[in-house]
Image (tube, helix red, strand yellow):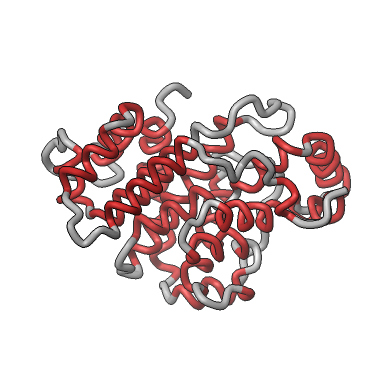
Amino acid sequence: MLREPGDLLDGWTQISSLSIVQSRLNEEINNPRASMSNIGQIIGDDPGLTARLLRLVNSAFFGFPSKIETITRAIVIVGLQQLRDLAMATSVVNLFKGIPKHLVSMESFWQHSIACGVAARILAAYRRETNIERLFVAGMLHDIGRLIINTKVPDQARKALLRSKFNGELLYIAEREVIGFDHAAVGHALLKAWNLPPSLQEVVAYHHNPQAARRFPTETSIVHVADIIVHTMQFGTSGERFVPPLDGSAWESIGLSTSVLSPILDQVDRQANDVVQTILPDE
């Protein structure tokens, strides 16, 4: 019997290619003698990761005027911390395989998740946040707990989907009723086990309830609003059939005028498909 979200994490806290690369990057970045060439070599040891990052930094997502051909150059242009975050985000998509399509289409799931990351990044840019790539990562990972649920307890995941459909209730509420907790709690437990930054953990934990965020309320509110925007645009789906309600206080805490919504929607529409194809070229 499941008692808490961590009960679903067996096998997901072990060393994976994601955590190996991320650990090496973190160790080198935290080294006072860190060099761009060493960091470039760590990323270069994973040809797939190198290709994804170079495609991303050369896409409309960044809009740089000239082509960036090396990881070292990408570090100079994008920033060390930012590239590390992007490396982690683009690696996560390869960890989940074999989830039944009747539970979720992986293509549609990542369309929604990546579009949410794009929307969060755009909102953060309007707010002039210092690390908008961190918001992209947070948006990309906000529903990752749903993949764990679908992988570890598919029968209960299906019951939650059916309950949501026939009762007309939001899927995360149905998850709580059927499983005892929702995908946000599972995602928080996973990111904590992976030792990812506390800001990412809190955003994922409270993206449906941003008022509960204590340390990073602005970041959580940004991803909450981004999620609603992408649901409204019907850009992919993580399994949710309905548009979750917007927390009005989250929009107020972001501090943007409603006049920016139209250009934000236009930018999400222009950028999201490009980023999806960049990160998921095989899809």
Q: Position of residue 234 (x, y in %)?
A: 57, 43
Please tell me in which quadrant of the rendered image residue 193 appears: bottom right
Q: At 55% from the left edge and 72% from the top edge, which residue is drawn?
A: 250
Q: At 59% from the left edge and 62% from the top edge, which residue is drawn?
A: 207
Q: Nearer the viewer, residue 151 or 229?
A: 151
Please tell me in which quadrant of the rendered image residue 10 appears: top right
Q: Nearer the viewer, residue 155 or 128?
A: 155
Q: Is residue 245 left or right of residue 71?
A: right
Q: Nearer the viewer, residue 192 or 176?
A: 192
Give the residue at the far top of this rendering. Answer: 282
Q: At 47% from the left edge and 45% from the top edge, which residue is drawn?
A: 115
Give the residue at the far left of this rendering. Answer: 66
Q: Is residue 77 left or right of residue 44?
A: left
Q: Position of residue 265 (x, y in %)?
A: 43, 52
Q: Is residue 93 left or right of residue 109?
A: left
Q: Position of residue 222 (x, y in %)?
A: 48, 65
Q: Position of residue 116 (x, y in %)?
A: 49, 50
Whether residue 125 is situated above or below residue 232 in the rendered picture:
below
Q: Nearer the viewer, residue 13 or 215?
A: 13
Whether residue 186 is situated above or below residue 239 in the rendered picture:
below
Q: Is residue 49 left or right of residue 229?
A: left
Q: How many marks are shown on the rendered structure?
A: 0
Q: At 78% from the left edge and 35% from the top edge, which residue is drawn?
A: 154
